Image (spheres, helix red, strand yellow):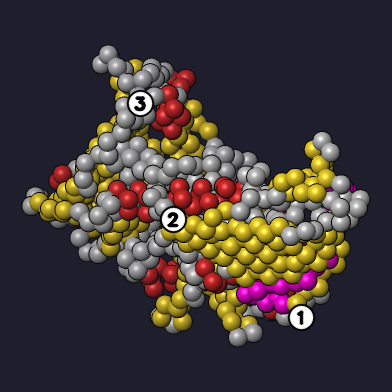
Amino acid sequence: MTSSCVKMFCWAVVLLGPVLAVAGEPDAVIEVWDEHWTLTPDGFTEYYFKQHVRLNNERAYGEFADPRITYNADTDKLELIAARVRRADGTYRQPPAYSHVEVAPDTCAGWPAFASIRQHLIVMSGIEPGCVVELEYKITGTANRAYLAAAVPLGHQYPVRERRIGFSTHEYVKPRFVVEPGNVAPDGGFDRQTLAGEASDDETLLRHAWCFKDLPAVPDEPHGLPSHLRHGRFAFSTTGGAVFWLRGTRDELNGAAVAGEIVTRLADEWTKDCSTPADKLRAIQKKLAASFNFVELDARWWPASVRPAPAVLDSNYGTPPEADAAFLALARAAGVTVRIGALVAEGAPINTAPQEAFIAARVLLLDADGETQVWNGRHGCITHDPSYAGDTPLSLTGDELQRTPLPEWADAGDSACRISGKVTLDDSAKLSGEVSLSVSGLFVIPEELRTYDNQKRRARDIVRRVLPDVDVNECSVTRLDEHEFAADVKIASSAELDKIGLAYSLMLSADGPHTLGIAMPLEDAERHGTVRLAGAFVEDVELYIEWPEGWTVDARPRAIEPTSGPWGSMRQDVTLDDQQIKLIRRISVSSRDVSPADWPALRSAINAMRTDPGRTLLLHK
């Protein structure tokens, strides 16, 4: 776009504080990072990208030394403006012709419907510590687009000196945008200054641009906050609002979910033994998840239209929207009445800048048994699935936006894992006993507990998070619904305990029952950012272990002093009597987010229980 087509230039300068001090040079520094989108009055698009990255250590080479530019060869024109390396001595190295290679993205290679999706791979030359990789290109779309939208990070795991983001649209288009500072602005605010623009004779396009200075590095850590909370996010959209956008998403699926011979045949075959709508959806979903090839192509490169469901099922592969349209067509062919919805990712500014990037999954909403079930062709019934905690299914009733909240598991009391009972060690050093167990909240996924075999398997998995070498012989379920699973079980070991010298060793599991639903980065002693757990939770273990008369205890699990903090509390008590010990363990984590300052105390307490002294009982005859 030239200056002659610009009516006004709106420039916002955002200062988000100085770069965080680090010892030595960071592995890489992004000196310039520029992205700009243009939607012309006739519906064509243009995407401009520019990035200059100083590489100080080979650890950072992979992301920048061999860049890949993705585009659709049928509908896009790629113009490579610059691809070179400025070496430490100031000289430039251009990649030779053979360093430019056209490849297919790994996610869609081999699928004929997506053969036009290409990646221009550039193997940069002259890479060395201190060099600067310079990449600049433009992708011009040759197919009309109804709207323009994007959601991009502000920051990166490496510091960014200058981040420019902008878009240009016709003067009658009313774009919406939002700036989410995330952790690049710890105080949650920033200074903004709008400078006067320039007018021109051509009053076609308005250019909007923002410049962010000196964004600190925000490392990517396991079990961290979502990217937009760590790096910040800039999002814009010209769709005209959430209702208009969701209506378009719904109409797209409706248009593709057409009937056909293969749709009717599969629906009849897969649901022939089902009576309720939920059972039919379950049967269809299980077949799809087991046999359909889901092509995980980035939403930016999906074909402009969704293939009809019969064609998708006949080829047995497709993008997420195509799989969702096939799921919808099969449901309707089976006589199931559902509403179309979109599961929006947690924290997405869907009202401000609605777009495809914010959809975690397209869903079908089934109103049954007094509740609204949320279904997806790949992931099944996700109404109570902790993987989607905080996400929100949206649907339309007329022109009204309807929200179906999913559990967030924010209260520790909502998600508990409890086990209690008594086990006995006989004279042959084998264990047997009876225990009661119950789990609730995020530890319960009803779809995984629908059969007795699955219930028994779940009970076994819970017990083995305390006593790792036992089997469940009998399982009597005492409670089962979408919120809680409880059972009384009889357990026994098939082999005698291991021996260390003359002593028998009974080692409790290093990973407690809570690990069935809660993963923690326990190997990380320090954190730069917040630790995000699946949810707040409680774990209670109360176990009596008896042994034969005349046996002697050489070592027992050590007690762990009560400890507490903003994260919650925990303790382990061990009481020794003549022929038994009583072990009581209490863990309560009161928040799904644990701050970097609080993390070491929680980690230390959990790891104290996982050590050999914290879980070992030694006895000899």
Tell me if I can see residue 362 in this picture. Answer: no
Magenta extent: 479-497
Residue 55: which numbered mark, if any? 3
Residue beneath the point at 43% across and 59% down: 565
In-image side of 269 versus 616 (left or right): right
Whole-number angstrom distance, CA of label 2 to CA of label 3: 33 Å
Disc 3 from disc 1: Cα separation: 62 Å
Which residue is tagged 2? Answer: 594
The residue identified by callout 1 is: 275
Q: Which residue lies at the image location 32% right of the left edge and 53% below the top edge? A: 182
For residue 560, say whether it is visible.
Answer: yes
Q: Residue 32: give x, y in percent of width and height.
A: 26, 35
Q: Quadrant of the N terminus?
A: top left
Element assignment for label 1: loop
Q: Residue placed at 29% from the left, 17% from the top? A: 88
Q: Quadrant of residue 326?
A: bottom right
- Quarter of the image holding residue 368? bottom right
Closer to the camera: disc 3 or disc 1?
3
- Type of amino acid under label 2: Val
Say whether disc 3 or disc 1 marks the residue closer to the N-terminus. Answer: 3
